[in-house]
Image: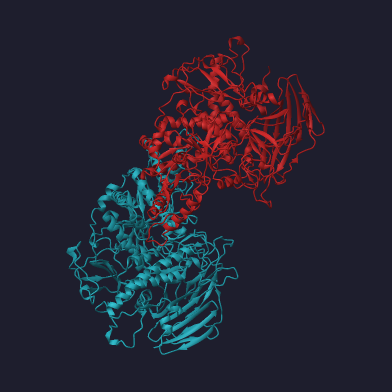
Chain colours: A red, B cyan
Amino acid sequence: SALQLPQPCGRQGDGHVTHLNINRCHMIFGLFSNMAGRSQQLATSCHATKPGMLNVHLVPHTHDDVGWLKTVDQYYYGDRNDIQHAGVQYILDSVVDQLLKNQDRRFIYVEMAFFYRWWKSQSSSVQQTVKQLVNEGRLEFVNGGWCMSDEAATHYSAVIDQMTIGLRFLNETFGAFGRPRVTWHIDPFGHAREHASMFAQMGFDGFFFGRLDYQDRARRMRNKEQELLWRASDSLTPPMADLFTGILPNGYNPPEGFCWDQLCSDPPIRDDPDLEDYNVDDVVGCFLVIANSQSTVYKTNHIIMTMGSDFQYENANLWYKNLDKLIHYVNARQANGNKVNVLYSTPSCYLQELHRANLTWPLKTDDFFPYADDAHDFWTGYFTSRPALKRYERISNSNLQTCNQLEVFGEKAMAVAQHHDAVSGTEKQHVANDYARKLANGWQHCRVLVSNSLAALSGLSAERIYCENLNVSVCPLTESSKKFLQVTFDPETGLISIELPNDVLLKRPRYNASAGNNVESRQPSGAYIFRPNSSTPFIISRTAKTEIIKTSVVQEVRQWFAPWVSQVVRLYADSRALELEWTVGPVPIDDSLGKEVITRLDTSIKTSEYFYTDSNGREVLQRKKDFWPTWNLKQSEPIAGNYYPINSRAYIKDDVDQLTVVTDRSQGGGSIQNGSLEIMLHHRLLHYDFRGVGEPLNEISGIFPDGLVVRGRLLLTLDPLPTAADMHRPLAEGMVLQPLLTFTCLSTHSPNHMHIRTFSGLLAALPPAVHLLTLSQWDEDSVLLRLEHQYQSSESKVSSQAVTVNLQKLFSTLEVLGVAELNLSANQWKDEMKRFDWTPEKGTGHQCCVS
Amino acid sequence: SALQLPQPCGRQGDGHVTHLNINRCHMIFGLFSNMAGRSQQLATSCHATKPGMLNVHLVPHTHDDVGWLKTVDQYYYGDRNDIQHAGVQYILDSVVDQLLKNQDRRFIYVEMAFFYRWWKSQSSSVQQTVKQLVNEGRLEFVNGGWCMSDEAATHYSAVIDQMTIGLRFLNETFGAFGRPRVTWHIDPFGHAREHASMFAQMGFDGFFFGRLDYQDRARRMRNKEQELLWRASDSLTPPMADLFTGILPNGYNPPEGFCWDQLCSDPPIRDDPDLEDYNVDDVVGCFLVIANSQSTVYKTNHIIMTMGSDFQYENANLWYKNLDKLIHYVNARQANGNKVNVLYSTPSCYLQELHRANLTWPLKTDDFFPYADDAHDFWTGYFTSRPALKRYERISNSNLQTCNQLEVFGEKAMAVAQHHDAVSGTEKQHVANDYARKLANGWQHCRVLVSNSLAALSGLSAERIYCENLNVSVCPLTESSKKFLQVTFDPETGLISIELPNDVLLKRPRYNASAGNNVESRQPSGAYIFRPNSSTPFIISRTAKTEIIKTSVVQEVRQWFAPWVSQVVRLYADSRALELEWTVGPVPIDDSLGKEVITRLDTSIKTSEYFYTDSNGREVLQRKKDFWPTWNLKQSEPIAGNYYPINSRAYIKDDVDQLTVVTDRSQGGGSIQNGSLEIMLHHRLLHYDFRGVGEPLNEISGIFPDGLVVRGRLLLTLDPLPTAADMHRPLAEGMVLQPLLTFTCLSTHSPNHMHIRTFSGLLAALPPAVHLLTLSQWDEDSVLLRLEHQYQSSESKVSSQAVTVNLQKLFSTLEVLGVAELNLSANQWKDEMKRFDWTPEKGTGHQCCVS
């Protein structure tokens, strides 16, 4: 047999666990270093604070995008500084040097994609020094994933994988001292509830971020609700998915006037009294005003200041030299009775003080989408930006999950693509190309592994052909070989009617993008921002050219709405789902207008302004038009302000029926009219939206010189309400994890019976509610297994029930010698996962569960 | 008595020297630390080279302007990084850290104005570490003056002072190991022969610079004459003023593609073979091509590369990390037979290898003015830029020389103003203001000192009033008190005729500045570049309004050519020189044209295209129109290409007469027509000339909201050729060092005879040829005295003779207890000043002496 599960040597006592009760949880078998000692270390490594004073926690940090304006390699080495000055190798060199100069100094680091590279190129003496800094809490890891993942366009399975890779590296390199206690998503453009749930299950004590809706922020500042308890699942028993969440005061930047990085130009502290420009009194005075002002919008006598930003600390001396002086001169005023105490700190030291405050915190049960930073600036365009890359990422995830023994390089390419400027589509074109190249490289490795495995299992060593472009019909083997309901179509308009209790009208309209020349706001549509120049979409064509094909397997209607918009509607004999294969592009721009192309389903379902979208492909959240559950929304963008990320599915329903659309990639969509559901498929934009990427989202390539053509699939299923989840859960799972097809030629002389044609690693099919999320080789002696219960509480009478799985009888060729359960990210024994306990304020929290 | 000359304790043996034979030389009395050991240190601190290979000396360096786009303080602290990213405190922090990481690394530092500030803010342990780096030759000082002085607009007395301040700091801080052996003028825009002469007399072994005429450079590359022996005086006996001079290969920048500073964006060395972007082979290949190519234009198997530039090394890790790799990977190829050896080096280590080569070198006796970097890009505008600041610098020097016990602050303000972006006028307006403010501050200190000295000497303690603005008649005391030839004027044209063998026609024309819209070149006139849009000046007015005033003391003619151009012509009864006081401004710009205002003297002197200008106010050099003594000039700018710096005087002559013009500040001028001499007085420009300063030279201030008004004086003297020097030498000396006037009210009740009204520190007037250049307190026990012979060889039959001065009988109130002679910069005993000997090539050198 290919895989052997040995006795786990680190946790002998758990070796007898074989039956697991699965109620939406995750588990692994593994081998671990000692996790003890972390809380003790925190107590001694955090600087003392002063109870009767306002304690200002200065947190030196750098935010290192794992690709954005430059590729990952360019960022690491500091190449192409003409595009953006950034070189992560130098950041880490410099920070380590500067931490050694003053033991009071602190630093946090986030992105393991960079840290790992840097680490492996260091001498053992530098490595030893860094270990010492980590052990003493002077260098603290936060988040610790391979990247800081995007929260709108990522699928939970890939997020768990990328966090696991990063946290495993930290655990194996630094042991317990390297385990992050705080997660840190300072830059992503909106925050998904499923992310908070995953972070809680990974054992994090707290979560800090920087971006939220400007109206929400203003309200939270007034009410001192910028620190809260997020109850991130309505299925898991609290506090299993509870996560303490803090909103940082200045995004992730320092307060105005206090940016001392080489990338900034704020005045340094000039403390030589002999010189003309002595400014210590000015700087201290200004700092005290800012600190005291900030303290009025937070609950405790502790406040945090993020002292750093994008790719800062390349020359850490500039920051630390001035921060040393700031701390010295501000605290010197305590002798005169001033009640402000400044200290170097880290998010976990700050969090520890909040926990010690023993207060109650407002409870939140919804999420932080969509994100708007001003009235006409909704970051909802990136839900759809770069649709081809979004699909390629999803296919790659599927293929790589198929390889149950992922090679390191393949794993890491997937992890990098979870970054919030990668799968989000908000990177520069050349960076998008590099992500795709990295994914392709990962796949090359996986191909070899799959071929070898199949050869071993089947006994057939013939070459295997992988046809990645089956959807564009360029698989030489299948092309040259010799051997994806009653529907009515209006032949004039091309609109589809399906014989079901409701009429489903399929339209393919478009919005024209705002060019930024509007009187209300100069904000144009771009890679991040969606802003149509009118709230009424334009119908591309009221007529369609139509062809109909019927076979015993499939009924297919082909429709052309315009030379650049077509769709194929398919109904398979063995499926209740209607497949819509859409093809959009090149989007015409001869009228000098960017365009955002949507598909819209108009039905007679009585939605009462509600609709539903998934969070990172897992739990589903209720959405309501022009409404936010937590606060009184003032809507300023009727379309863009009602868009939400759709990772795997969206649905509309009434008391009787539910229409679910399953997507093949992350997209943005909304329900603008009652009974209607629209999804943005593709957009091509001619203006830059002022959020840093510096180029319009106008995808052109060698293959598509006139503009990108994108093809994709939507699966529609209309079901009676009680059984809808039983339909869309397996449908969406099948869409995310597709069969990997390989083709091979069999010699006419080789007897077919000589080859094993079927093989299953499982003894029997898993119960329908249980999904084998992860099965991968962990090390020579163990595999990592994650089983999940994929139904939300009460969405299905049958399938939402708890299930027990007997691991001993799970695998066909693997013998289970022992089992040990870990946290979701596999970097801590589950029974040692002791998180801070937090008390919610009474009367807070909103019930917006899916019923 | 105020000053006492004690027995010098460091050099007892020389205490009996009292009679000095002065033949254009300089000397001081002083007290010194031990100067031994330097040559031994060089031999051990320089990296070994390889005789059979091309040795590439990499010289890491930073060029830190002592003021340019930002003020000195802003540059030091890194303030106003929005104007220019530059912070010298961080450069020195970073370089010291990085030198400690690898003992092979080297660095040179130049500007003591910055180093001194940094040094005094360091802990004693850092100071000890830096001393060790200096002792081991890992950190080497080059040049070592307070700044890198401008060479066109500086007066030799101020240059000697600023070099002395910087070198004294180095000597007192680091002893012999801190004494620079190489001087380094990589940025000044043209090079003065007097500077080379001074550097030789200061004991420097070699001189490196970056800028020279583009045609001259091309020729020197072809002929391998970029390294040469400069014989910098035709008065001093060789090798007294011989200076080995090297022209650097890329200005002072690294070769193209090899700039690894944070300010650059060349690709870093990516040497992880696991990554896509591995580029070691490309980088090494490219470096070898550049090194081999460079070796073809130099004489030896050693070449130098300047690895640094303006304000670089703020994050020295970027440079050193990549240089370490470059050295490693290039030298690794020696194993495969490659004959290139790369090493960290310094200019003195490189110079030592050139000296060991024992070759002969081409001899040069002229200078490097004017500097053009392209056919229409003559850097001759800065000779006149900021005429008001140029005058203020000269007055300040005069006043400060008057204070024979200069206070430290006053000294240093003068030193800073010698920088090549200060007195040159090529700094930004706000920086020019800061220079002026620093000069004024220095003067405040000096006032007190002068008042106290005068009170002590006169016995009169009444308040003394200093009227700095006498020339604009705003001295309250003199204004309200109750108690410096037959000339004919044409009343129509205002032109002057002087009854002398020649007619001298005085005109006040202007050039219109090129706006950069010319077909030949887009170069406009600016702070650096002079480029009139026509070779024919415009006459401002052909008529003048005239007033005549005659008294027994002076005959004065006042002339108004235009509302913004006037002049007063004065002839004093006791003087043979005609004074022209010119007032120019606000220069009108209502025609949107910048203007360069000149005065032109048209005479019948038969100049045969020759004219003469001083070098830094001292020796005089012969100039010839459209001609360069060393090479075959192709002239492309008939006006700007014939302009030279005039520091103190210019003259034209024939076999009989010499017309000399003595200036009150540094200016630019030329002789475009036979018999004619023109001087640019002021210019106001509306375009930026693309040399980095980023703003047009358009001086406007609160006092002069419509544009700066400048007033100045020219002294004209027409003499028989044999006695002309006897006339212009004292005249120019008087112009440079003017009496400092103070005023006081004497009470009518106080008997005048109670007060000493005259005092002389000298027993008798010095011989006419001898000038007391410096007399200042050195320390508690000694003074610094410099006597100079101010006549060039053979310019005067009488005055050019050698003179002997008896120091014992020199001073009225000082007793000379001992004398020790030092080099010109007072940082080495003269008898220990052993410079490298160099052999000139036979047949090179040009006789262009003044006869």
Q: Is residue B206 above or below residue B651?
A: above
In the orientation shown, which residue stands out farthest toward the front?
A: A842
- Tally of marks: 0
Q: Is residue A167 left or right of residue A545?
A: left
Residue A129: x percent and y percent?
36, 37
Q: Quadrant of the N terminus of chain B?
A: bottom left
Residue at the spot 80% in from the left edge and 36% down from the top edge = A543
Residue B187: x percent and y percent?
42, 58
Q: Is residue A277 left or right of residue A840?
A: left
Residue B65: x percent and y percent?
42, 58
Residue B344: x percent and y percent?
36, 46
Q: Is residue A447 above or below residue A747?
A: below
A427 and A275: which is toward the camera? A275
Can you tell which quarter of the image residue A154 is in?
top right
* Residue B61 in sight from this viewpoint: no
A553 and B547: which is toward the camera? A553
A609 and B515: which is toward the camera? A609
* Residue A188 in sight from this viewpoint: yes
B47 and B582: which is toward the camera? B582
Q: Quadrant of the C terminus of chain B?
A: bottom left
Can you tell which quarter of the image residue B644 is in?
bottom left
Q: Is residue A800 above or below residue B409?
A: above
